[in-house]
Image (cartoon, rainbow, N blue to C red):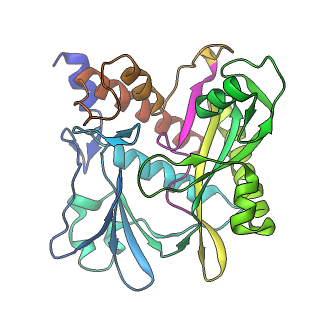
Amino acid sequence: MDSFIHAALCAIYLNGEPYMKPVVNIKIPGVKKKYSGKVRDLYIVDKEHLLIVSTDRLSAFDHVFPNGIPGKGIILNKISNLWFKNIKVIKNHIVEDDVSRFPKPFCDYPELLKDRSVIVRKTERIDFECIARGYLIGTGWKDYHEKGSVCGITLPAGLQLAEKLDAPLFTPATKEDTGHDINVPVDVMRAKLGDELAYRLGEVTLRIYEFARDLLIRQGIILADTKMEFGFADNEIILIDEVLTPDSSRFWDESSYRVGTSPVSFDKQYIRDYLETTSWDKNSPPPPLPDEIVAKTLEKYQEILQRIEAIFSR
């Protein structure tokens, strides 16, 4: 490993010590894991609360890669917590993010949980992802290129890759436990949830997107799109899971943004772009990521964390 890659991988610190080895599997002694997702693990705290642990696992194209990104879970957790604390248009599920105040036995394992875990309220998850799109990219670009519309919303002809939309779009996706979530028209959400709830979810999603978009651009970051999840707690809609992280959003460098090209990003798109250049078929077990790709991904995630921290440190 050359000196640049080594320096990049050493740049994350945990409890003041260089943090090199990715945490892809966490075992809390004496506690049974409730659920293990692509990135996050869930543990039952009591009847009303869960512990969410953000690991360093990396997923792309619905596969989890054998090697993770060192410190990625810490970065995701810190970014989410910053947004959760500053988004005021809706309540969220966070109860506690300080490990020293976690109940036993969780508070006994700061070396496992510090900076990468939160205690949250249990909710009844609403089984749709709520996506806000401000630019034409990803599956939105693919749909537009093929149909001239995105999730049933017709757009003007002649738009280019990464072009800014006249107004941000709300486009839901079904929340699938396995495989890829499926983009659907808002009418599908309305039929499943009712007009009032579907309208509320769309309204809140776009308000959060616009709030974050206007803050990020001050740090030279374009928020191209982002996805959110919501749930019910005591008959109230609240924001859950993660929010406005490089795993759930596309962050672009404003200074190099050009319509018609895939912009320089500070998110998981870098991994997707790399994988498109390989021979991996996206169906077989994924190969380990090269060290230089791991290091560059870590660098991008750190960069967006630093810029978001700068927003809220003023």
In front: 237, or 3? Answer: 237
On the image, which quarter does residue 290 sit in?
A: top left
- The residue lying toward the viewer, choosing from 115 and 47, is 47
Horizontal relation, residue 195 to residue 239: left or right? right
Residue at 56% x, 34% y: name it.
250
Residue 35 versus residue 13: which sits nearer the camera? 35
Dividing the picture into quadrants, the one containing residue 138 is top right
Residue located at (21% from left, 72% from top)? 108
Q: Magenta residues, as a range?
A: 240-254
The residue sitting at 44% across, 33% down in the picture is: 268
Indicate yes or no whether the magenta region holds residue 245.
Answer: yes
Q: In which quarter of the image is the N terminus?
A: top left
* Residue 314 appears anywhere in the view: no
- Location of residue 209 in the rendering, given as x and y in whole percent from the top left corner: 69, 46
Residue 249 position within the rendered picture, expressed as x and y whole percent measured from the top left: 55, 40
| Percent x, y of residue 183 | 62, 45
Residue 287 versus residue 181 in the image, above or below: above
